[in-house]
Amino acid sequence: MTPSDIPSNIPLNIDDVDPEWMSNLLGHHVADLTVRQIGQGVGIMGDIYRVGLQYEKQAAEAPSSLVVKLPSSFEENRTQGVALGMFEAEVRFYNELADQVAVGLPKVYRADIVSGAADFVIVMEDLSDLQMVDQAVGMTADQAMTAVNILAHVHAVWWDRAKDETMDWIPSMVGPRIEFVDQALGEMLPVFLDAFENALPDGGRELYERFTGNYLKVNRVVADRSPWTLVHQDFRVENLLFGEAGSDRMVVLDWQGIGRGPGAYDLGYLLGGSMAPELRREHESRLLAAYHNQLSTLGVTDYSAQQLAEDYAIAHLQGGLATAMFVGGGMDLSNERGRELAATMASRHATAALDHDGLTRLDDIVGQS
């Protein structure tokens, strides 16, 4: 696709987000603006900017700043985003599904995309008054409790509804997208291990080697027996923004990886990758109980605490390991922040899987290697 094929209301890059473009979006005359990139190394699939706005005539309802998300500057990352349908999925989520969730989502002013391409724009409220947590540091126990409660709210909306034909456009956790990733992991394994083996716990290399080629098989085990919902599939702390200490306010970002499948996937991904292992071990049972209690409060009656515990244990053999490999072995990590993030994910997710008998569970699922 050439620049002339892209609708003029979708910026080619941040330079196209000028006062005229913002004026047309907001319906207020923007006299000037300032742009600052934020979240480098965090928004791996997208470049994120905070745009400060100055108006010719200030209106009470006009925002003083907004956040603009555009495709990643790195060609490899854009190509992966198109191949996995991630850019289009996020735009459709905001336009078609977000209004069904009562908590935890940002106000979005514009979400638009050229179908089948990497050309998209998302404009949302500036949430700089909320706290972003460094994944290398990890969540506190209180932040984790807020996160699992919000996650349960999201999952409850679509609990046991995600197989409905109206949601077929969302990739399933046992569908072609996971098959694509599963096949790609074999090629990525040597690159991943070469870069990050030194960050892995004892048994981590063996775990990743035995997991490679079996991601889809693991997903099918849980998907065949547990209710499906809408899953975020990248529900980690750097996609969450928190209110001040003692507040239960939290906003979830980056809905580009949404899928359909059992909710334990998100729960394992969150706790396995976004908490220091010692803290996770200390609070894990309490956090699982809180998630289950919140589901029950919201009307979910067909899912026992025992089933959740088993699904959660297997979930550590799902998205966390696959994402760590995909990021560490297949993405452009040309900045130190991106490499640090990949190393943290690789180590923590392997540790969580091993804590829950990951090697034995893999043997049970796919047989002795």
Image (tube, grey):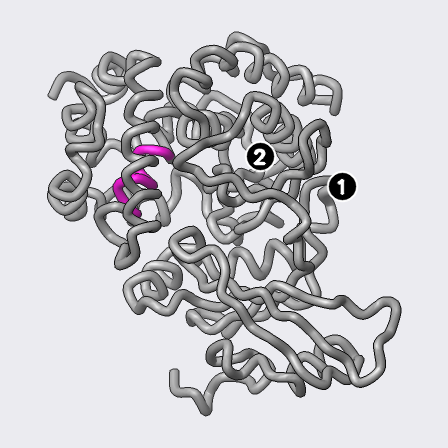
Which residue matches tag 1?
A: 102
Question: Residue 229: which numbered mark, if any?
Answer: 2
Residues at marks 1 and 2, CA–CA distance in whole angstroms: 16 Å
Image point (16%, 43%), residue name: 195
Label 2: element kind? strand
The C terminus is located in which quarter? top left
Packing grade of label 1 (10 A; few <14, some 14-19, many >=20) is few
The magenta span reads 320-327
Question: Does residue 349 sit above or below 354 in this rendering?
Answer: below
Dominant secondary structure, magenta: helix
Label 1: element kind? loop
The answer to which of 300 and 26 lies nearer the viewer is: 26
Question: Does residue 230 sit above or below 94 in this rendering?
Answer: above
Looking at numbered disc 1 in the image, what kind of residue is underneath it? Ala
Q: Left or right? Give the position of 155 relative to 109.
A: left
Question: Does residue 204 sit above or below 18 in this rendering?
Answer: above
Packing grade of label 2 (10 A; few <14, some 14-19, many >=20) is many
Residue 27, x across and y down, in percent: 79, 80
Whether residue 159 is visible to the viewer of this picture, yes or no, is no
